[in-house]
Image (cartoon, rainbow, N blue to C red):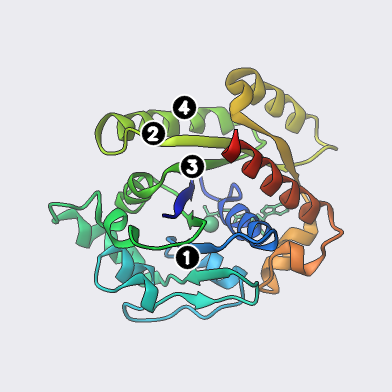
């Protein structure tokens, strides 16, 4: 069975999609079979692979609501071994549609249960709505990207409360794979202050790998390419390859 990894942080713009797209690519590059599930109505992970956003129900909306077999809507990416289920803005309606359903917390878990990939990486939207509750329920583990900026720790406390209540209710086995420091700017002393703070608090839960702020990363996404395919020698690519190595090491530990 697949391992489902949610990439989640309720804060917007902290590097969730960048982490999902590039970790998925780096895992596929070492021979893992990977599915990216774009669970954000913004559809940034879909665009990040240069893929079209499929309308109707042939997308993560249909999968989340259990309207369609996910096997019928996976798309190939140009990365060998890496597939994607796209999202569209229609997914934003799912929050409301789920609300009145009895099994509203477990729809996604049931929908993707039979998929056979080494990893399913779920690109979560910002916020704490039912889409994210479904992701936290379906996930075996989560990665928390954390931008090295002033309010980072405050947001993290809120996220940990949510994780704890998910563990107390619907998914007691939910594991945190790690907190990932993103957009680290070594010319900005605040970055290192925050990084030290986070490591002081969360110790080994923080990945040793740090993703630097690297303009090549945002260029790559605007070209619909993971950084590893866009510029494999860039600091951003090297960091994501290192992240995949550390992630797999944590898997076997
Ligand atoms: N390490 C980095 N260096 C430079 N730019 C980055 C880096 N990581 C992400 N970005 C850019 O920052 C923006 C936000 O990143 P991203 O989309 O991954 O965040 P997100 O958490 O998924 O956002 P949202 O909450 O809106 O889904 C994007 O334009 C992305 O290209
Ligand atoms: Mg995103």
Q: Nearer the viewer, residue 7 or 215?
A: 7
Report ligand 1 position as a quadrant. Answer: bottom right
**Is the residue under label 3 in contact with that under label 2 (CB below 8 Å)?**
yes
Density class for disc 2 (Cα within 10 Å; few <14, some 14-19, many ≥20) is many
Cα–Cα span, label 2 and label 4 = 10 Å
- In the displayed structure, does residue 51 sit left or right of residue 219? left
Queried on whether the Cβ of the residue with tag 4 lies below 8 angstroms from ligand 1, the answer reads no
**Which one is earlier in the sequence, the residue at label 2 or at label 3?**
3
Queried on whether the Cβ of the residue with tag 1 lies below 8 angstroms from ligand 1, the answer reads yes
Query: What residue is at 49 percent from the left and 42 percent from the top?
Result: 142
**Is the residue under label 3 in contact with that under label 1 (CB below 8 Å)?**
no
Cα–Cα span, label 1 and label 4 = 25 Å
Percent position (x, y) of residue 251? 57, 40
Foreground disc of the pair 2, 4: 2
| 158 w.r.t. 135: above or below | above
Percent position (x, y) of residue 152? 58, 33
**Which one is earlier in the sequence, the residue at label 1 or at label 3?**
1
Foreground disc of the pair 2, 1: 2
Residue 163 badge:
2
**Which one is earlier in the sequence, the residue at label 2 or at label 1?**
1
Determine the residue located farthest toward the top in the rendered image. 200
Provide the residue designation for mark 3. Answer: 142
- In the displayed structure, does residue 253 sit left or right of residue 126? right
Foreground disc of the pair 1, 3: 3
Percent position (x, y) of residue 246? 68, 40
Residue 135 badge:
none
Density class for disc 1 (Cα within 10 Å; few <14, some 14-19, many ≥20) is some
Query: What residue is at 71 percent from the left and 61 percent from the top?
Result: 218
- Asked which secondary structure carries label 1, the reply is loop
Provide the residue designation for mark 4. Answer: 157
Residue 42 badge:
1
């Amino acid at each position: 069975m697949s391992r489902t990894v949610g990439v989640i942080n309720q804060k917007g713009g902290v590097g969730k999609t960048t982490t999902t797209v590039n970790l998925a690519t780096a895992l596929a590059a070492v021979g893992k079979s990977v599915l990216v599930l774009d669970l954000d109505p913004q559809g940034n992970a879909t665009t990040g692979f240069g893929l079209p956003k499929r309308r109707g129900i042939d997308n993560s909306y249909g999968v989340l609501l259990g309207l369609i077999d996910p096997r019928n809507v996976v798309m190939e990416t140009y990365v060998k071994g890496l597939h994607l289920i796209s999202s569209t803005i229609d997914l934003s309606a799912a929050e409301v549609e789920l609300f009145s359903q009895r099994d509203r917390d477990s729809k996604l878990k049931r929908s993707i249960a039979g998929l056979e990939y080494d990893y399913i990486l779920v690109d979560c939207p910002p916020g704490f709505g039912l889409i994210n509750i479904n992701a936290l329920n379906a996930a075996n583990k989560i990665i928390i990207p954390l931008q090295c900026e002033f309010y980072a720790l405050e947001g993290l406390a809120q996220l940990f409360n949510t994780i704890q209540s998910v563990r107390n209710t619907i998914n007691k086995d939910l594991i945190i794979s790690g907190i990932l420091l993103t957009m680290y700017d070594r010319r900005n002393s605040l970055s290192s202050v925050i990084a030290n703070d986070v490591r002081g608090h969360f110790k080994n839960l923080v990945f040793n790998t740090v993703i630097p702020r690297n303009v090549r990363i945002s260029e790559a996404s605007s070209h619909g390419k993971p950084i590893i395919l866009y510029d494999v020698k860039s600091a951003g690519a090297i960091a994501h390859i290192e992240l995949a190595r550390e992630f797999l090491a944590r898997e076997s530990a």
